[in-house]
Amino acid sequence: MIQNELAAAISTAVSKTYDVKPGLIEVDYAQPGFGDFASNVAFGLAKELKKAPREIAAKLAEAVKHDSLERVEAAGGGYINMTLTDEGISRLTETAPATKPASHKGQVVVTEYSDPNPFKVLHVGHLYTSVVGDAISNLIRLSGGKVHPVNFGGDVGLHVARNMWAMLKDLGGEKPEKLADIVVAERPEWMAACYVKGTQAYEESEEAKTAIIELNKRIYGILAAEDHKSPLAQIYWTCRGWSYDYFEVFYARIGTKFDKYYPESMTAPLGIQTVQKQLENGVFERSDGAVVFRGEPYGLHTRVFITSNGLPTYEAKDTGLILAKWQDYHFDRSVVITGNDILEYMKVVQKSVEQYEPELAKRSTHITHGNVKLAGGVKMSSRKGNFLRASDVLDVVAEANKAANGSADDVTVLGAIKYAFLKQRIGADIVFAPEESVSLEGNSGPYLQYAHARARSILGKAADAEHGGLNELEDDERSLAVIISRYPDVLDRAVDELMPHHIATYLYELAQVFNRFYEHNRVIGDSRESVRLRLVALYAGVLKDGLGVLGIEAPDRL
């Protein structure tokens, strides 16, 4: 990175000029009109040298040397501003599209996200975390990692029992033959409706609650006995299969792929076995018949891992999941992407694992995000049935795109949705605005897709023309070259933080700079055609590459 080279040059200048060893030297992009890069190193040295920052900066400006620097100047109260030569800018610009981070080179990384529960429908939150998970997986691949995306879902537990209790009511009892009456298109909605009914009954009726708790035990029994023949088992396995089929269709539509799906029924036995073993080793303890982990000594809270009935909680299932992923992949890093609502919960699970598998805990990263809310800021809840389905989001955006742009194709629809999610920093709540997401004049996915198509159109009109080198750049050409050259630094930051929004922000700024360039500079037929065609090609390449990292297609035509 050029910043590292410039920082080294400043460090050498400090040592030679003042015979001191500077600490960490930061080199940032300069404000427009003040060169290409700037450093505030003089402020940090002022106290030690007992000199004014401006005086220090002036002397260092004379001493800093680098082959790519055209001039170095002291400015303001003590900043060092550095301007690169055209050759320096050209070198960085030419290599920008191909320069990738290498921070995950050779590493095996498991990314876990989406995590829908069978017997329910996918809501917009699942769509959001799928888009984010795909982008983070792409960042890790980009930096050399071997990524294994996996999915985890609750196919057993009280939520399933609540659902199946209502299903049995609708079917008139344990009558699997009645499932044939439910048409394929209505199956997800039927299961979603049953979940709402079962949850309401569980919360409002002691009789129903008792029946659901008993049903939950029977479902665990079906799994333990590998029962596929009893009427209840036939209903369970059929409906679970419907859920997985529905998930696969949706994931294919949005371009999400997983290497493996971990159902809770698979991870629960390993979780129980591990917790019981570590109970003997003193990691866990008994409390009123249950097995718990005391989190208070670590500034956390106590959570139950095995109930007094001997059933695993989410905590035990997540423990089994961590160990199952390790057994399957022996990962260098595990990245888990979930909502903010389980942040404290996951801290307890990770802390418990740290007591007996410290290396696994060390290799794990938990990234949390906010909720996607309905209009008015109402939090979604599948319990209450007031949630926005993931498929509804696709349909609503398709309608908005058709109304605004005359198109409802999945390329721009998915581009609109993914960019609208990814342009925002992961962590905060999101209010999704379909009309804004499809705008061709604002900060949107379709705007950038059309920007790429426009660049490809320019290049197509001069397909046989030669592209020249980037020497002796004019002002507008240099401005475009400078922002193109910064792409590798943006990728580095996005990978280091696993934050895709850095790329989205950069791409929008890049497109704006190009638009200003194109408005004031003729490309085809100009005396500088070859130079400008080379800039357009580099711009299009960076735009396509960046959109690809975000999981957004960059078509040549729209």
Image (cartoon, grey):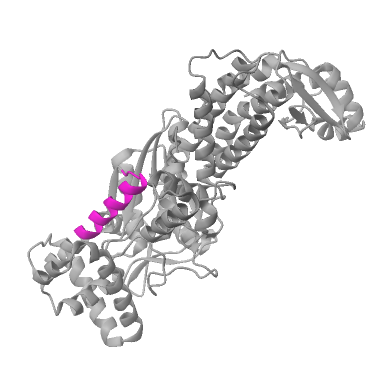
Residue at the spot 76% in from the left edge and 18% down from the top edge: 12
Picture quadrant of residue 2: top right
Residue 94 placement, left or right of 399:
right
- For the residue pair 123 and 23, the one nearer the viewer reads as 123
- For the residue pair 445 and 519, the one nearer the viewer reads as 519
Q: Which residues are magenta?
A: 241-258
Q: Quadrant of the C terminus?
A: top left
Whole-percent x and y of residue 270? 27, 54
Q: Quadrant of the N terminus?
A: top right
Magenta stretch holds residue 361: no
Residue at the spot 50% in from the left edge and 54% down from the top edge: 368
Picture quadrant of residue 489: top right
Q: How many numbered markers are drawn?
A: 0
Q: Establish if 447 lies above or below 185.
A: above
Residue 38 placement, left or right of 253:
right
Report if residue 29 is visible in the image. yes
Q: Establish if 546 lies above or below 279.
A: above
Q: Establish if 232 lies above or below 551.
A: below
Tell me which secondary structure the magenta stretch mostly adopts. helix
Whole-percent x and y of residue 167? 21, 74
Whole-percent x and y of residue 504? 56, 42
Report if residue 101 is visible in the image. no
- For the residue pair 386 and 451, the one nearer the viewer reads as 451
Whole-percent x and y of residue 239? 20, 63
Residue 45 placement, left or right of 429:
right
Picture quadrant of residue 106: top left
- For the residue pair 162 and 314, the one nearer the viewer reads as 162
Residue 528 placement, left or right of 348:
right
